[in-house]
Image (tube, grey):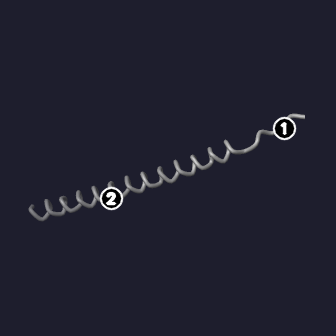
Amino acid sequence: MEHQFFIRQQNLKLYRSLVAASEAAAAKAHARQEKLLKLLAEEVANEPLPRKN
């Protein structure tokens, strides 16, 4: 019985570790996406307006 408890405890630690790693990766990807969107917005803002003939 103690062995099963130990295994469950270890599984819970592994699960929490995986969740934390997943959240960190998601936050990093989000920050990268925000940076790219900001660069794109700056690029679009700096484009000259098309001329009307």
**Residue hosting label 2:** 18
In the picture provided, is 49 more to the left or to the right than 10?
right
Using the image as rendered, state which of residue 18 and residue 6 is in the foreground: 18
Residue 21 horizontal/vertical position (percent): 35, 58
Quarter of the picture containing the C terminus is top right
In the picture provided, is 48 more to the left or to the right than 44?
right
Residue occupying image coordinates x 50% and y 54%: 32
Which corner quadrant of the image does residue 20 belong to? bottom left
Label 2: which secondary element: helix
Residue occupying image coordinates x 29% and y 59%: 17
Three-letter residue code for mark 2 = Leu
Residue 48 horizontal/vertical position (percent): 76, 42
Label 1: which secondary element: loop
Three-letter residue code for mark 1 = Arg
**Residue hosting label 1:** 51
Residue 44 horizontal/vertical position (percent): 68, 44
